[in-house]
Amino acid sequence: MSFGDPNNPYGAPQGQQPGYGAPQQPQGGPAYGYPQAPPVQQPYGAMAPTTMPGTVSAARAMLWVIVGLQVLGVLLFAFSAVAIDQAKDDAAFEALADYPTGALWAFAVLALAWGVWAAVLATKFTSGGNGVRVTLIVFGVLTAILALYPFTLVGIVHLVLAILIAVFAGNSKGAAWFQRPRY
């Protein structure tokens, strides 16, 4: 029996023309089993950031500036409260003596608490997760609101810094930094 005859139905298969007979198999891979799955994609590009992005680093620096401004505010409120307490004994400063020093001490305590909150947030940038990011956004919004209403003239620097902190923590680079996996 000769396998060389192209019309022999029992012979070895000869090269078939494309489009005729059995469907063509893709070259380079097996034709059986499950199809290959697409590659797994990371949620933020190819890899999570390994170094802190510039905007996130700037937000941390702005928090440290707010800490410094809060320390100055605490000193200013405390000095004013002590000065008004001392002025109550002097008749020349009777107009200042009517000002409640308790409100100044309350502002000093509020400024100190706000500064401590900013310092804690600034130290959590390298180890904090998404909760720190959300807290940064809340801190920025609350600081901007407080800078607008009671402290309008002296709060303009706080207003600008707070808006930038909220924006830098809320953008995609901030999200990628605070939601990165920590092994």
Image (cartoon, grey):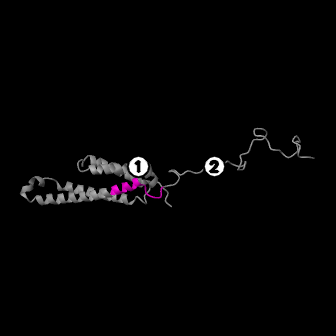
Q: The residue tagged with tag 1: helix, strand or loop?
A: helix
Q: Place residue 8 in its image quadrant.
A: top right
How far across and down, in percent of the image, does residue 112 sit?
A: 28, 58
Which residue is disc 2 drawn over? Answer: 37
The magenta stretch is 49-63
How far across and down, in percent of the image, does residue 172 sit?
A: 44, 49
Q: Residue furthest front?
A: 4
* x 8%, y 59%: residue: 90
Q: Which numbered dot is residue 170?
A: 1
Give the CA distance from mark 2 to mark 1. Answer: 33 Å
* x 36%, y 59%: residue: 120
Q: Number of callouts in the render?
A: 2
* x 20%, y 54%: residue: 103
Q: Are marks 2 and 1 in contact (CB under 8 Å)?
A: no
Q: Is 55 in the magenta?
A: yes
* Observer-nearest of 84 and 28: 28
* Observer-nearest of 3 and 127: 3
Mark 2: amino acid: Ala
